[in-house]
Image: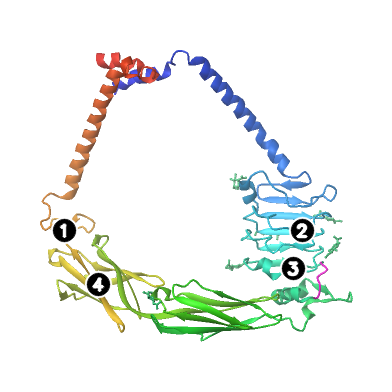
Amino acid sequence: MSAWRPGSEALTSPGRGSWSWRCCWWWWVMVVGVAVGSGDPWLSAEACPSSCVCSSNRISCVDPERGINAFPVLQTEAEMENITDIYIANQSTFSSINDKDLHYYKNLRNLTVTNSRLTYVSKLAFQTNLKLQYLNLKDNNLSSLSWRIFRHLNISYLILSGNPLHCSCENMWIKLWLGEEADTQELRCIEDGGVRKLLSRLTLPNCEVPMATLNPSRVTLKEGGKVDLSCTTSGVPSPELIWNMALVSNYHIETSGQISVLRLSNLSSLDHNSKISCTAENIVGEKESSLLLDILFPPKITKLSDAIPDHHWCIPFSMSGNPEPQLQWYLDGKAVLEGEYIMTMIHDITEREYHGCLQLDTPTHLNNGRYTLVATNKFGTDQKEVEAHFMHNPSDGNEKEPYYYASSTESPPVDPPEDRVAVYVVVGIAAVAFTGFLLMLVILKFGGNSKFGIKGCALFQNIPVEVVSR
Ligand SMILES: *[C@@H]1O[C@H](CO)[C@@H](O)[C@H](O)[C@H]1NC(C)=O
Ligand SMILES: *[C@@H]1O[C@H](CO)[C@@H](O)[C@H](O)[C@H]1NC(C)=O
Ligand SMILES: *[C@@H]1O[C@H](CO)[C@@H](O)[C@H](O)[C@H]1NC(C)=O
Ligand SMILES: *[C@@H]1O[C@H](CO)[C@@H](O)[C@H](O)[C@H]1NC(C)=O
Ligand SMILES: *[C@@H]1O[C@H](CO)[C@@H](O)[C@H](O)[C@H]1NC(C)=O
Ligand SMILES: *[C@@H]1O[C@H](CO)[C@@H](O)[C@H](O)[C@H]1NC(C)=O
């Protein structure tokens, strides 16, 4: 320990000639620090427009004299991410919400733009504002608004009264979506002749939400099989038809008019429980029809591993198969009788796999041996083997205490394992410490010698004499 003291002395006494350089450096750090520190508030004052009031979570712009024409941009992304409310009112030059305007306001919940000149809202306006719930666009200049602006959102309030909405098919979704709320807001639309009518009374020919129908509606087939799925759409204006799926199996699509056929072949078991959907979409809205593939295939044991000690011992396995395979375990060729102390447990069922354990409660040497798992369903069978050795220390009944397990050693070790580990650790630490000490000595010894070319290193310069003298 005391051998270190000379070293620390060497640290505190600066090397000759380096004084003025350090002085310079600190001076520079201080100048920069002061500059950065004072720059911060000045810049953020600049970032919040003078006609707005910005707090840590809210931006409000209501000054009609010094108006804004776009959303404020704050100094840092972090500041914008903290904003949950934006309130804009009485801004006669505010006319649009464009693609990227709200990009950084990722936590925005309430947006109000009222009594302004809002005329255009981009379809991508709220692309990143997934938390947007309350949208108030009252008293603006909107003549239409697309449902696609909101397709990825979960809006709870939409206030549109006081806008010159056209009685057009594009706005039909507003009537359908708001329902009775449209009357509560007294929403009106303007017909071509200039007549205003209640939106809830709006009826238009050739303006309907489309339909999509998958046929057949269920698919249960053997692996390797093939099937044609047809999707029939209807609606006016005639909808766009979109298939959506991620499949391993071969497929191709043939579309003619309002009907599309998905031809699936060589069905893969990897697609069991995969979703296939067909969506019809037009200016009024969208409808989806979907199914989950049910693919029958023989059992496959994908994993059977060495036993692991947990609360109980567990021989872990993973397998797949549809219908669900029956499982039977064998120990050295003899069927394992499951019961209170040995049983198969399924812990997790994913889309295509079952994950579980052969669980053994306090196994003894009688449970050692070669375990075989056989999985069977009506399409076939699969099996895998693993060697397991358990040893129970008879002197200790406590569950968490020393069991010993080795997969390959025939003769278990004599010492309790923890003692052996402890000895290894102590010996290891001692060896490392000693090596380090020798190394230090070598470095210190030759460090002062200019022949070895490390004389310039101030830390080691004065050390050798003192260490050797101790
Ligand atoms: C964001 O808000 C949190 C909690 O209100 C606050 O601690 C943090 O300083 C804010 N971050 C910024 C950049 O304003
Ligand atoms: C907007 O202006 C109107 C008068 O034109 C006023 O009554 C209203 O309070 C103003 N709104 C806000 C939020 O300042
Ligand atoms: C904004 O959102 C908060 C919480 O989501 C809500 O309590 C508040 O009433 C909203 N503001 C307006 C103007 O609706
Ligand atoms: C309102 O929007 C229409 C287009 O829909 C535009 O021609 C008109 O100039 C806008 N009015 C104002 C006052 O901005
Ligand atoms: C949508 O919002 C409602 C309540 O506002 C909530 O109950 C529902 O879970 C939300 N759905 C999603 C997908 O966030
Ligand atoms: C069917 O799929 C299997 C594997 O999924 C592949 O080995 C086989 O070659 C495929 N057959 C055809 C005709 O594509």
Sequence-wise, the earlier of marks 2 and 1 is 2
Q: Is residue 429 left or right of residue 369?
A: right
Q: Amino acid at mark 2?
A: Ser
The N terminus lies in which quarter of the figure? top left
Q: Amino acid at mark 4?
A: Met
C-alpha span from label 4 to label 1: 24 Å
Q: Nearer the viewer, residue 375 or 258?
A: 258
Residue 225 at x, y = what percent?
41, 83
C-alpha span from label 2 to label 1: 73 Å
Q: Amino acid at mark 3?
A: Leu
Asked if labels 1 and 4 touch by Cβ distance under 8 angstroms, the answer is no
The residue indicated by pointer 4 is: 343
**Residue occupying image coordinates x 47% and y 13%:** 17
Q: Amino acid at mark 1?
A: Ser
Disc marking residue 408: 1
Q: 192 above or below 398?
A: below
Residue 231 at x, y = what percent?
57, 83
**Residue occupying image coordinates x 17% and y 61%:** 390
- Within 10 angstroms of label 2, few (less than 14), some, or many (20 or more) residues? some
Sequence-wise, the earlier of marks 3 and 4 is 3
Disc 3 versus disc 4: nearer the observer: 3
Disc marking residue 96: 2
Q: Secondary structure at mark 4?
A: strand
Residue 242 at x, y = what percent?
59, 75
